[in-house]
Amino acid sequence: MSTAAPARSREPLTPADPTAKRKKKIREVLPLYLAISPFYLLFAVFGLFPILFSIVLSFMDWDGMGEMSFVGLAQYKFLLTDGRFWNSVGNTFIIWFLSTIPMLFFAMAIAFLLHQNIRFTKFYRVAFFLPNVTSMVAMAIVFGSVFSDTFGLVNSALTAVGLDAVPWLSSPWGIKITIAVMVIWRFTGYNAIIYLAGLQSIPTDLYDAAKVDGANLWQVFFRVTVPMMRPIILFTVITSTIGGLSLFTEPQVLLGDSGGAGEAGMTIVLYQYNQAFTQFDFGYGSAIAWALFLIAAIFAIINWRLVSGRGDDTVRRAVRTKEARG
């Protein structure tokens, strides 16, 4: 006759100690935070601290060596009446207008061509993106030789066909056009690759549905492709605007700290550099930096309002047609 094993006494279950659970969780995640801490330490020292310190400097008068003296809003008041600053603002906006609109148009055209079934697509992608990773200092020197007033290749080509030479680097508009061409050359391929990624993400069913509705090629492009590309276009417009308002390397290397003849190439950042690191007026340089931040923020908001929006009716009809036929 078998005997049943004695029943084990069960201890009542008690909830785990919250303190112990918290300590265990800290031990689990601490190595992860330590692994990424170098980035945050470097950002705090070389990114966050300079930003906060520049705010303080904009209310100070300081040459970088002596004691700081608090001047309140004097730097910003002088900024509003500084003719050289407003000249740099005008130069920056003109260069931005001359470069951004053609650049984005060429980028969209290149992306559309690369989106077709053509040979050597990968080679063309690398070729168009290469200028973006090329040293801008080296290319500014090359452009200085190409657009030189006396022995430049562009003027040599113009005189060879019987046209007059253009003072590219000694006239106000010649300087602005030269800088704009440099910007177009550098960033067209970069934006084209971004547009290409956006084109490849558009479902082909939308194009089929639009064609069924009788849309021609132009209607398909402007009422299907462009609305579907609105987020990509918005991104490129905002980044191009911020980059255009922050031009420094191109005019500084091409023309020097003076900005060329009549300061025609004096951009906002170049003027800020001159005030802070040539005139050693760090307070006024910080005020210019924050004025640039405000201008860039305003233009980013304007671009957001102009470019963003709901899709076109053709897209919605195409979607409905697709669903109906599905």
Image (tube, grey):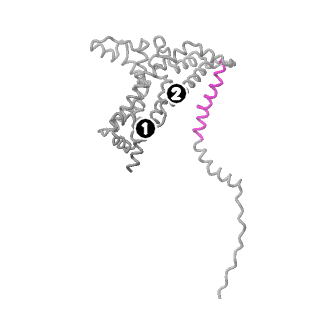
Is residue 311 within the magenta segment?
no
Report x, y in % for residue 74.
65, 16
- The dominant secondary structure in magenta is helix
Tell me which residue sits at (36%, 31%) in the image: 109
- On the rendered structure, is 299 left or right of 321? right
Please tell me whether residue 103 is drawn above or below residue 213 in the rendered image.
above
For mark 1, what is the residue? Answer: 313
Q: Is residue 54 magenta?
A: yes
> Which residue corresponds to mark 2?
302
Residue placed most toward the observer, 316 or 172: 316
Q: Secondary structure at mark 2?
A: helix
Query: Which image quarter: residue 290?
Result: top right
Q: Residue at x 69, y 77 (%)?
A: 7
Residue 247 is situated, as x and y percent measured from the top left of the image, at 49, 23
Q: Which quarter of the image is occupied by the N terminus?
A: bottom right
Q: Amino acid at mark 2?
A: Ile
